[in-house]
Image: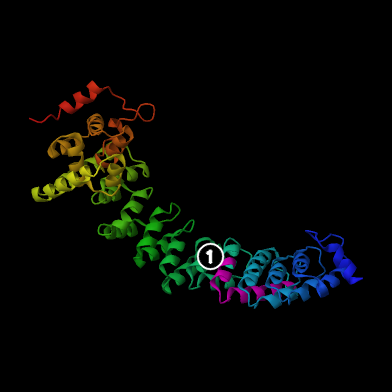
Amino acid sequence: MINKFLSLLKGKKKLPDDLNYGDEKTILKTGNVKQRKELASHPKTHPEVLYYLADDKSADVRRRIAKNAATPIQADEKLVDDKDDEVRKELAVKIARLMPDLAENEHNTLRDNTIKLLERLANDQLPKVRALISEELKLSSKVPKYIITKLAMDMEAIVSAPILEYSPLLNDIDLKEIIAAGASEAALVAIANRSFLSEDVSDEIAISLEIPAVAALLTNRDAQIREDTLDKIIDQAQTVEELHKSLCMRPHLSVRAMKRITGFVASALVHLLMENNDVDEDVTDELLDNVRQRIASERIGQKEEDVLISQARDFMSRGMLDDKFVIKQIESNRRDLLIACLSLMADMQVETIRKIIFSKSGRAVTALAWKAGLKMLTGYEIQTKLSLVPKAQLVSAKKGKDYPMSEDELIWHLSYFSEE
């Protein structure tokens, strides 16, 4: 009888839905691995059969048992210490997803046992198992807080970071205690990325002096930062270039703060600062003028300029002076090298290039880009990120890519800077 039943199953991709308890026991006793795997994952398999399959010698079968939502808690308890990592991973995901659905006021055996299982999995020796639980529970408010706290304090960033960044169960006191306990850089970054971060927690992150965390704090639009805390960050940022872009991405800065920032950041970042802060035209012009004056005061000596021209000639001989090269130099804030390169590309004196760059004339800068053989879109990048042309003076591309002026007009604008 048994052999006849099993022979009927041969060649079938899936077990039939109308298996009875006797059929299941037959597969349990004499079925092959494929049949037991199907039985282990079937949603209608009897709980007793699933319980016995939790001891199956095949790890593939046990993984199916761990994943099956119909598996009884008693079988899950067998798998919580399974030697196969993948079995515990499957179990971790299932239990973590099940936990929030159990009513908090139901102090029944099922809820209590599920919590115990979750605790044990949250202490699993494999970080990936703990990380799976963390990822599943990061947004839940219906989990025992001590489990969330345990995950938040985990030494592995893949475990702690999701909880620290998203868990609604962590309050300011919890976060400050975690920071005070010596949180890792990754943990501080996760906290800095939280929505609606309070001024108190922001203060603690700023005090930590962890550059990636402070950078994340600055770019988090929901983070509240006190004015005096921001002043301290600006003080620090003057000698820490990694913070420059993050500062320029910070919204709602005061005019005073922006003036301080434009006193040391690269010219390529100034328009980014303007884009993220709604300031009127007069303030914008004042800030841009301050940057131009600063750059003019940073003029290099003749010896350094000769070295840069020599480098520019080398780049030209290797065919490197193109649009991509120019954009890279702008983004890397290699202003003086780029001016030397533009001098060769446009066949003009370095001092003439410098005058055009800082003329505040979008048309003159556009004409320079044309003379250097660059695309109009590159010319626009030079206007905004190198020359700091005021918004009202910017020249945009025609039809999204073409120069908007005739050749005669372009030459005419360059004639104002003609060399004697």
User: Is 251 located above or below residue 397 in the figure?
Assistant: below
- The C terminus appears in which quarter of the rendering? top left
**Residue 58 occupies quadrant:** bottom right
Which residue is more in the foreground, 396 or 56? Answer: 56
8 displayed left or right of 250: right
User: Is 216 located above or below residue 280 in the figure?
Assistant: below
Examine the structure image and report whether residue 207 is included in the region drawn in magenta.
no
Q: Position of residue 245 (x, y in %)?
A: 33, 51
Q: In terms of secondary structure, what is the magenta stretch mainly?
A: helix
Task: Pick out the residue farthest to the left.
Answer: 420
Task: Pick out the residue farthest to the right.
Answer: 1
Examine the structure image and report whether residue 125 is included in the region drawn in magenta.
yes
Q: Residue at x 9, y 48 (%)?
A: 302
Range of residues picked out in magenta: 110-132
The number of numbered badges drawn on the structure is: 1
Q: Amino acid at mark 1?
A: Ile
User: Is 337 located above or below residue 2 in the figure?
Assistant: above
- The N terminus appears in which quarter of the rendering? bottom right
Which residue is more in the foreground, 380 or 136? Answer: 380
165 displayed left or right of 393: right
Q: Residue at x 32, y 37 (%)?
A: 280
Color scheme of the displayed model: rainbow
Mark 1: few/some/many CA within 10 Å (<14, 14-19, 20+):
many
Q: Residue at x 71, y 76 (%)?
A: 57
The residue beneath circle 1 is 163
**Residue 74 occupies quadrant:** bottom right
Q: Secondary structure at mark 1?
A: helix
Q: Position of residue 18 (x, y in %)?
A: 87, 61
